[in-house]
Amino acid sequence: DKALGLAFESTHADRGALALRTSTGFEVASHRAAAGMEDPKPSSTFVTRVVEQRLALVAIDTSEDAALSAARSVVAQNIRSMLCVPLWDGEKILGYLYLDKVRGGAVFRSRDPDLASAIGHLAASEIRRMTAAQKAYEAEEQNRSLARFFSPDVVRYIADQGHKGLLDPTLSVQEQEVSVLFSDIQGFTQMSERMKPTQVKEFLDRYLDRMAKIVWRYGGTLDKYIGDAVMAFWNAPLD
């Protein structure tokens, strides 16, 4: 949003938008418009041209461009001048920065594309940084979640296979012969009847924590807790 604001002010645009690539195309992440103006709807004709040619483009006067002057969005929004800059990550386009001016106002200057490109470069760097940080956070959260049930060795195995693209922990299904353990506390019902609820909770917290550590110590996977019972298995995903 800061990049869009800087480009908006620097080029004296009437409206602007910053869009990011999604699995289905591009989606506007933020927009800005001068007082009294509606939010912009970037011309798909112009954006497609920018993406296909892979460079920043400016239409000083849309009336002089046959394709743009006939584009419905340009006509409907009364756009006189427009500018669009791709946001790069190496060879990949992360999104685009779009600016326009409506009829009755000035047009973009010849230096504005270079100015917008420089701002777009800074925006792309910040998007890369934020994307990397988000991926690192998601990986950490996934490992933390897995660590509740799997031994450290299994967590590392799942993460390693996922990074190599050999295993999707959320989707992969494998058939494998395993050893399953069911264990509970003998006489727990009678014992818990003589205890306060807080004492039962504290007792189970300590007991289940110890049981989980024993399972992990021998390379097992904690499947679930069932009251005072523990279900665990071995030989999956590691033999």
Image (tube, rainbow, N blue to C red):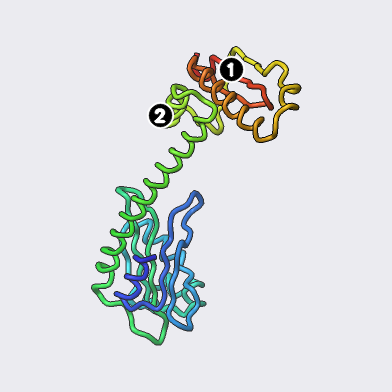
Residue appearing at x 60%, y 12% in the figure: 179
Q: In which quarter of the image is residue 159?
A: top left
The circle drawn on residue 233 is 1
Q: Earlier in the sequence, mark 1 or mark 2?
A: 2
Q: Which amino acid does label 1 sit on?
A: Phe
Q: Which of 134 and 52 is in front in this view?
A: 134
Within 10 Å of disc 1 (Cα), the crowding (few <14, some 14-19, many 20+) is some
Compare residues 239 and 93 and report the one nearer the observer.
239
Crowdedness of circle 2 by 10 Å Cα count: few (<14), some, many (20+)?
Answer: few
Is residue 108 shown above or below 178?
Answer: below
Whether residue 132 is situated above or below residue 108 in the rendered picture: above
**Screen quadrant of the N terminus:** bottom left
Q: Nearer the viewer, mark 1 or mark 2?
A: 1
Amino acid type at image mark 2? Lys
Say what secondary structure mark 2 lies in: loop
- Asked whether residue 238 appears in the rendered view, the answer is yes
Q: Residue 67 carries which label?
A: none
On the image, the x and y values in percent for residue 61 come to 35, 78
Q: How far apart are marks 1 and 2 (CA)?
A: 25 Å
In this rendering, would 135 be left or right of 111? right
Q: Name the residue under label 2.
A: 164
- Determine whether the residue tagged by mark 1 lies in a helix, strand or loop: strand
Residue drawn at the location 54% of the way across and 22% of the way down: 210
